[in-house]
Image (cartoon, rainbow, N blue to C red):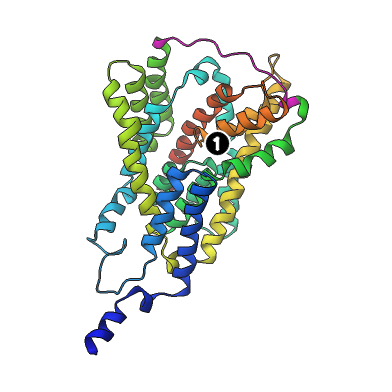
Amino acid sequence: MDILIQFLQNTGFYNIDIKNIIMIAIGCIFIYLAIKKNYEPLLLIPIGFGILIGNIPTPASALVGIYNDGSVMNLLYWGVKSGIYPALIFLGIGAMTDFSTLISNPKTIMLGAAAQVGVFATFIVAIYLGFSHPAAAAIGLIGGADGPTSIYIATKLAPKLLGPIAIAAYSYMALVPVIQPPIMKLLTTKRERLIRMALPRPVSKKEKVIFPIVAFLISTFIAPATLPLLGMLFLGNILKESGVTDRLAKTASNSLINICTILIGVCVGAGTKGEIFLTIQSIKIFVLGVTAFGLATASGVLFAKLMNLFSKVKINPLIGAAGVSAVPNSARVVENFGRIDDPENHLLMHAMGPNVAGVIGTAIAAGIFLAVMV
């Protein structure tokens, strides 16, 4: 009987509490949204199942949890805390990204920069809500809709808030098709949405090879603290564009980024234990995160409208919404939303310019915060 009682006391049924149950339900919702609604399944399924892993109650003697030194999950989580997974994901993003649209129309980089208004505005609001300056900076980065960058800066500035910041960032990346369209519709007229843009000029291979080198040097001289992220991003891109390292580019853009996406998703999810995650502070982070994302979208659209006041060649202001760095989801949302009013108006290629500029802009914003806060 003593052995039976001891066994029962070591089961999850005996140790579970209401916070674990709530988090398990949230994990199941993430998996449901990924499968049923097709909301970023590559992100939500690993995160959702990670939440299940992290909220299975275990006895103190088991030492299998993500916060138990030396456990398997703890060793995997080290890749998140050290910044290795975000850097490797940036390598894969660079190997998948075509900067042609940005090169052919350089002024769209200003739309990526304009979207960072949401990051800095939320930083100020977070300070007024009682967060420390480093924590506010990490929360503000959610507005960039860039999960790896949000995780990277959270590990440096607010490691105790890594779980809610990472979940918020990836959740809003998945909800781009839900959050952005109402903002775009509110801030534009039908006449503006009907603007058709000329095809981008062809970009030579020479330009494509020179761009990652020049962009790397300029951006890292501005924000040296982002060297691990931007270095990997532009390395991945030159692997792709050089034409002589196809094997490396394919590995970075397929196997490597897929492995890192699985590991970062599972670890981020597993880090959201109920007693740590379900707090008033986490609720504030989620509210601030959606505020940051909404402001970033709005500032991109409004800046595009401002540019049209001084430009003879008009741009469709919808592409300003792609200034957040959710690549290529935000650009796809712009394409789909623009075709509602004009099915023949294809904005995807134009939206990719500010979209990839947003990746660089968010990384530079992170570098500025790191330079000031660390």
* Quarter of the N terminus within the rendering: bottom left
Label count reads: 1
Left or right of 57? Residue 133 is right
Q: Residue drawn 74% across and 26% down?
A: 192
Left or right of 157? Residue 191 is right
**Above or below — where is 58 with respect to 161?**
below
Residue 228 picture quarter: top left
Q: Residue drawn 29% across and 30% down?
A: 251
Q: Which residue corresponds to mark 1?
A: 324
State which region is magenta. Answer: 192-205
Q: Position of residue 216 (x, y in %)?
A: 39, 25
Q: Residues within 10 Å of mark 1 (few under 14, many from 20)?
A: many
> Which residue is more in the foreground, 255 or 127?
255
Left or right of 195? Residue 265 is left
Determine if the magenta segment contains residue 198. Answer: yes
Identify the amino acid type marked 1: Val
